[in-house]
Image (cartoon, rainbow, N blue to C red):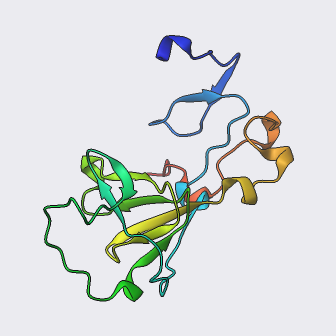
Amino acid sequence: MIADLKQYPEDKASGLSWLGQVPTGWRVVRSGSLFAQRNQTEYENLPVLEVSLKTSVRVRDFGTSTRKQVMSNLGKYKRAAKGDLAYNMMRMWQGAVGVAPVDGLVSPAYVLDVCEAATRLPEETAPDTADAEDVGVEDESFNEDTSA
């Protein structure tokens, strides 16, 4: 799969020593500027989703499940929209993350991130069409402290 990837024609310094070079036309921004969290509740009529290390995000099948988890109040569950990134913050390091395949409900303990990159970046500054002078670190506090 990696062999099929095309190399970018030109790289530039990212401005961050730990990151090194990035393709010209890329912008270095905080991930928080690309995602917003969804915390909508009271959607009890949607199917329940589960986040699994083995299967990513899927609709939970209560009929064949051996788990005896009781969900007493679905109104407190969070609404995940199709395409949302869902993960359990305490198991993220293990890879318990995935994209919601349909609109559904996830545990209140899960985090739902909505990708806002397409709506927050003007088309003329999108990564595939950006001018080199438009590319840069969005937040100065993100830069490394070199004053010490």
Q: Position of residue 38 (x, y in %)?
A: 52, 73
Residue for point 49% across, 47% down: 146
Q: Nearer the viewer, residue 57 or 140?
A: 57
Q: Position of residue 132 (x, y in %)?
A: 79, 34
Where residue 108 sits, quadrant-wise, is bottom left
Where residue 74 sits, quadrant-wise, is bottom left
- Using residue 96 as the reference point, say whether residue 112 is left or right of it: right
Q: Nearer the viewer, residue 88 or 62?
A: 62
- Using residue 87 as the reference point, say whether residue 91 is left or right of it: left
- Using residue 112 as the reference point, say whether residue 124 is left or right of it: right
Q: Nearer the viewer, residue 34 or 49?
A: 49
Where residue 77 sits, quadrant-wise, is bottom left
Up-down: is 147 above or below 111? above
Residue for point 82% across, 53% down: 122
Q: Position of residue 4 (x, y in %)?
A: 55, 13
Count of numbered marks: 0
Up-down: is 66 above or below 46? above
Residue for point 73% across, 33% down: 25
Up-down: is 103 above or below 19? below
Q: Nearer the viewer, residue 133 or 35?
A: 35
| Extreme residue in the right direction | 124
- Using residue 74 as the reference point, say whether residue 3 is left or right of it: right
Q: Position of residue 14 (x, y in %)?
A: 60, 36
| Extreme residue in the front direction | 63
Residue for point 32% across, 88% down: 73
